[in-house]
Amino acid sequence: MSLRVGIVGGGQLARMMIAPAVELGVQVSVLAEQDGMSAQLAATAVGDYRDLDTVAAFAKDVDVVTFDHEHVPQDVLRALVDAGVSVHPGPDALLYAQDKLLMRARLDELGIPQPDWAAFSDEAGLQSFLDAHGGRAVVKTPRGGYDGKGVRVVSDAAAAADWLGDLPVGGQLLVEELVAFSRELAQQVARRPSGGLVAYPVVETVQRDGVCAEVLAPAPHRSDRLTAVAAQIGTGIAEGLGVTGMLAVELFETLDERLLVNELAMRPHNSGHWSQDGAVTSQFEQHLRAVLDLPLGDVDARQPWSVMVNILGGPAEGTLEDRLPAALADHPAVKVHTYGKSPRPGRKVGHVNAVGDDLDAVAYEARAAAAHFS
Amino acid sequence: MSLRVGIVGGGQLARMMIAPAVELGVQVSVLAEQDGMSAQLAATAVGDYRDLDTVAAFAKDVDVVTFDHEHVPQDVLRALVDAGVSVHPGPDALLYAQDKLLMRARLDELGIPQPDWAAFSDEAGLQSFLDAHGGRAVVKTPRGGYDGKGVRVVSDAAAAADWLGDLPVGGQLLVEELVAFSRELAQQVARRPSGGLVAYPVVETVQRDGVCAEVLAPAPHRSDRLTAVAAQIGTGIAEGLGVTGMLAVELFETLDERLLVNELAMRPHNSGHWSQDGAVTSQFEQHLRAVLDLPLGDVDARQPWSVMVNILGGPAEGTLEDRLPAALADHPAVKVHTYGKSPRPGRKVGHVNAVGDDLDAVAYEARAAAAHFS
């Protein structure tokens, strides 16, 4: 068999597939948006992922096409599949990662627990949802949001006026119940085209300003019931939507201990970066194995605790590399991962993983090491 | 600071530096001997490493030059250093990895324990060594040998006649005592140009037909004394010879429990492949950190036991990739590493690492997984 995976998108998720690909003997190539991106080393083409000819030409020399992001248009994806290209995840699954309204409707059909939600196209529709949910709610654009973008907490209908004004004819926005949660969790699952599936340990994600700041793996203080329900939700979504490759399900744990689905991602995800140094099989290796329909790897943690802390923004002056000597000197056991991106406020430019027996010590180590880069 | 490492040589050792380089943010480039080599993904140049112009042109765009092998001629190395290029390990150290006669003489001066040895240039010289050592000895060509090549056990002086006949004027061969050993060990050490040094746990290496077949890490049944003496030998050699980067010292453990130095390698080494999945810092990451004079990483084992088994030769029919599905299905927790090389009898084409709490179980797992590829 041949093991050539083409990744559309040259960001850090594509970059982090390079290491396990080289070790396992998978030939990765990348269709990058421009020169000098994170996954530059494996870039074999530069072009617009919205252009069918560009993507089809890239797909010619690979066995499977997969993705660094979920933005490749449906018509491009479907044309590839029609031309016989193996695409994982496929358009029928990716649809639900691309459109949050479709996702909410489909999860309801599957009986997956999620916040109350509604589609609306005018202020009256939003106001009626607000009235029924204590006067506050979360408005989302169905497409294109990430890292807190396209998401807004509102307490009156006028606060969505600008987004409503930008809606195309027949367009709708999504409004969701503002969930009273005790914390946020994430469940990752990998699924093969031929059906095999594995569920990673559920993790706790800590968000700041709508962006993932750190991840504790596995989630502390988790009951067996919580672990099982999270895995059941992840498995149900992967199978219900026909996801292939890695699936990340962001979850709210409510004050009354229910789990509700927040967002989905059908690719390696920030909530799984801990697995590079903390799990037997990292999410990046697992994604490659899954999209190639190879047997999936063991998802057990290598150590009792892993903590991942994002490097957000990077140093105000100089480069990440300038800070490396001091960080490595003070923290010889942490693993520093950088993305080859220039520092910019709020930008994810790298992360740090620490592992060990004692959660407090591991978290301190990861945070202290990451602080060297801010 | 800038982190650009140029590796001379495109073999599997260069290939295995790619993964940690990408994660740490080190830009690696490779001067490959030809197209399509193991480290192809990072190859930026193809050319003859014996040609100064070729190597000097390659060195222009990097901060440090290091190596996949020890074959770059001294005059090329010295010209680079004279031109201001940072070369690690440097020519003064590499000399002792290139010439076994110089190595033996220098280790004697440093008081490092090693087998009895002598230089000889005719049959009479060899016969006199044989007479003094029970009639059997090991003859080696001082240069160019590896994986059992250039090494011959002899019991009469005529058995070296062909090598003697090929000697240039003034040339010498090396003869060494045939050591009665209980097993073979390897000690790895990393050393920075500014002097920092770390010693990995000593490991046991199992050879078949002069080639490393498997490695048990750390060495089973080791006393604290053995661990300390091995580390002391490794440290003494690294400091005594001024080695920078990774140093591997192959050792005999004698029947009377002494350690004697067999061979040296100044680069990542087969005896350290276990560290990719079994140590906090792999030898490949450590080598990059060391040659860049970055602080060295923790060398602790992540698990009580790691076992590395080489994939030698590969399948008689088909490719390594053909065997991957069955191997991964049967062994979801092992890590398979392949080198992008075509199968050929005796050739090192990949290896398998297994880790865990129970040595017998770990060794079984690694051997069974590797057997899928033969």
Image: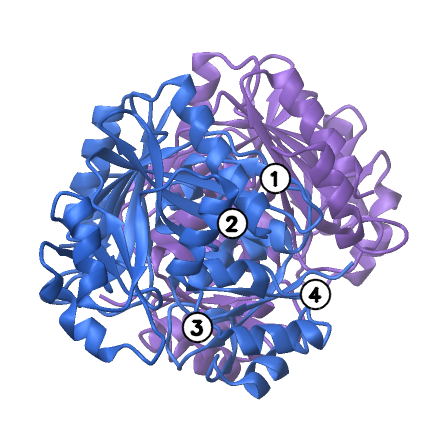
Chain colours: A purple, B blue
Marks 2 and 4, how far apart at CA:
65 Å
Q: Do the residues labelled 2 and 4 touch (CB within 8 Å)?
A: no
Disc 2: which residue: B246
Q: Closer to us: mark 3 or mark 4? A: 3
- Pick the quarter of the image with the C terminus of chain B: bottom left
Quarter of the image for the N terminus of chain B: give it: bottom right
Q: Mark 3 lies on which chain?
A: B
* Amino acid identity at mark 1: Leu
Q: Nearer the viewer, residue A299 or B166?
A: B166
Please name the amino acid that badge 2 sits on.
Met
Q: Pointer 3: residues within 10 angstroms few (<14), some, or many (20+)?
A: many
Disc assigned to residue B197: 1
- Can see residue A129? no
Residue denoted by label 3: B40
B56 on left or right of B15: right
Residue at left offset 40%, top offset 32%: B202
Give how far across and how far down residue B35 sits, in percent: 40, 81
Towards the viewer: B335 or A7? B335
